[in-house]
Image (tube, rainbow, N blue to C red):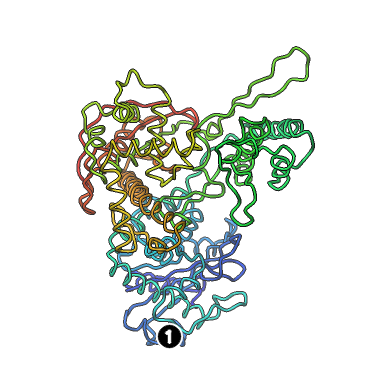
Amino acid sequence: VCDASRLSQEERALVLRETAQASVIVLTMVYQDGTAQLNAEQKSCPPVSGVLVLLKSELDAMESEGCSAGLPGSEGSGCKVIFLKLEQRPAWAQQGYRQDRFSKEMLLCILGSAQDVICFKAKDLLCTALQYFGKEISWKQVALCRILDPQIAAWLLDPADTASCFWDLVAKRCKTRAAVKPCAGAREFEQQPNVSGSLLVLYRLMMDLRASLQEQGLWKLFCSVELRLTTVLAVMEIHRIHVDKDALEKTSKILGMKLKQLEQEAHQAAGQQFLVSSSSQLRVVLFEKLRLHERCENKKLPKTVLRQQQSTSEATLMQLQDLHPLPKIILEYRQVHKIKSAYVDGILSCMISPFYNPKWGNTSSAVTGPITSKKPNIQAIPRQSIQIIKKQYVQGKEPEVITIHPRSMFISEEGWTFLAADFSQVELRLLAHLSSDPELLRVFQEPLAAGDVFISLASQWKGLPEGKLKPEDREQAKRIVYSVVYGAGKERLSEILGLTAEQAGQFVDSFLQKYKQVRAFTQKTIQQCQDQGCVVSIMGRRRHLPHILSPDWTLRNQAERQAVNFVVQGSAADLCKMAMIRIFSHIASSPTLTARLIAQIHDELLFEVEDSQVEEFAGVVQTTMESLQHIDCFGVHLKVPLRVMLSSGKSWGSLAELARPRSLPHRL
């Protein structure tokens, strides 16, 4: 392995020329404990030591044994393995300065290469490079880079069968197995035959996956969407979100006091002390002491899967809350506890004062294709405010009502504004397109379709003028539509609407009777899945469902719901990803726009924009997202228009609608 820090100026110039002329470049990061990205999955990632770069000048030599057995970089091998150090060094260390400059030139040359560049977990490499060099490398310099990532390729082939560890992926997907095993000792990168052999396995793995993607017609989707999205997500991670730490800490204390108050109320309602967070102790109180299940008329309470005990789930507690005060107290306790532990304290633990960097991914447990967030999950932070009633212990003093809005803790930087762009009812619009139901299409195709779609649906369904509808009519229409989209059964719908399962079933049947083509669409989707073993989104994303023909009714029914759900939700994820890529590319190519995409929440994109550019950028975002009604390169031509709602504000929790005149969408 050639250590770049020991090269002369002439040798470095030669390496840069070889890099520019290489047929294939294979990369992996090395950590300070001697492990690499190609080692087993680690719970916590150690500090980065550098990057190993395999340069190959001849493709045919990649299949020879010279690269895995001989000395890389020796005459005739066709390989050169270079180690670029990325360790932090003092500013006064001149050697460190020269090395950093060469590493930067090498990485920019690699990331700008038109040849194949391969890296396992490419997003982590891009994030590391951008964070390490800071202002020396602008994200716009790497915005067009394309790194072939075998982890994403394997996920695209089968989203339900992923492997986070490189060698597990090799065992599953590499057809041309190499006799190279990861070694256990430290400083693995110095063991030349092993590391060069491992990089060769990485190359072979990616070539096998490329062949599979091309064979299944997924190569275009991989290159045009998933690879480009990797860069978008890496840049999102380096854009820090400003958080009001003082407000978070104050909120954490308030929620902590509220939890103690709810514990006392729970003990009082139960007539005994017990651990409120313990499901087993709660089960004893609810069903052995209070025997609430015996008071449930015509209601079948859920049971646990393994032991078939009475469940203490949210669904059970909602059915019991009218029978006794305790279930309602427990529901509130769980809500407050989740907000405190998962979001408020979770964000505090991840903060680099006063900023917060969410982690984003597109291969983690997202079988329908959407972007996911973790550490903590910013996408799950509730939109609605929460009211906490703080009891006063002074006689005659009224309880204090404290309103907590978790999203208000996220604030824009000075001189910047948050801009949110939300696809309006995108899944319902896709359902109209996919089903071609004339009544559903009419709701969106009419000139005045910008009103409340669910009121229009409820009016159609119930046969009543909009002015005579009740609020619950709209809510029922909305819930029934999404029960079709998400595959919820009548039992789940009955819990949501507070009806019996029989009543919920009647509502669904009458709704599907009105919109007959929606039922036909679900039946056709299930039939296609049974025939082909998989379902496909509007842009060609696939999900295999092996249980679609299972003799087990439970497994088969679940697969049928997942089939319909994937086609609608997977297509919505396609549109959202395309929107992210198109807007990102527009910003990158603009010499003046400085907006940054900082979060993606379901069908909504959140940007941070300079105050002087909000109006201009809002137009770019709205036009780009609404024009995705037609995506010629993927043959997507939706029968209904897409609508995007814009809102802006100085905090994520105080966004106000931003009204703009609409222009006609153009094709992409």
Whether residue 18 is visible here, answered yes or no, is: no
Depth check: 336 or 251 in front? 336
Q: Quadrant of residue 484?
A: top left
Residue 330 location (% of width, % of height): 66, 36
Residue 602 location (% of width, % of height): 42, 43
SS under mark 1: loop
Total labels: the figure holds 1
Q: Quadrant of residue 462?
A: top left
| Horizontal arrangement in the rendering, residue 376 relative to residue 269 (left or right) | left
182, above or below 616, in the image: below
Q: What residue appears at the point 24 percent right and 42 percent down from the top-left corner?
A: 629
Whether residue 618 is visible here, answered yes or no, is: yes
Q: What residue appears at the point 47 percent right and 76 percent down from the top-left corner?
A: 171
Depth check: 500 or 132 in front? 500
Residue 31 location (% of width, % of height): 57, 66
Q: Quadrant of residue 442?
A: top left
405, above or below 564, in the image: above
Give amino acid for label 1: Ser
Q: Which residue in the structure is indicated by mark 1?
A: 74
227, above or below 512, in the image: below
Tell me the crowding category of disc 1: few under 14, some 14 to 19, or many 20 or more residues within 10 angstroms, Cα based.
Answer: few
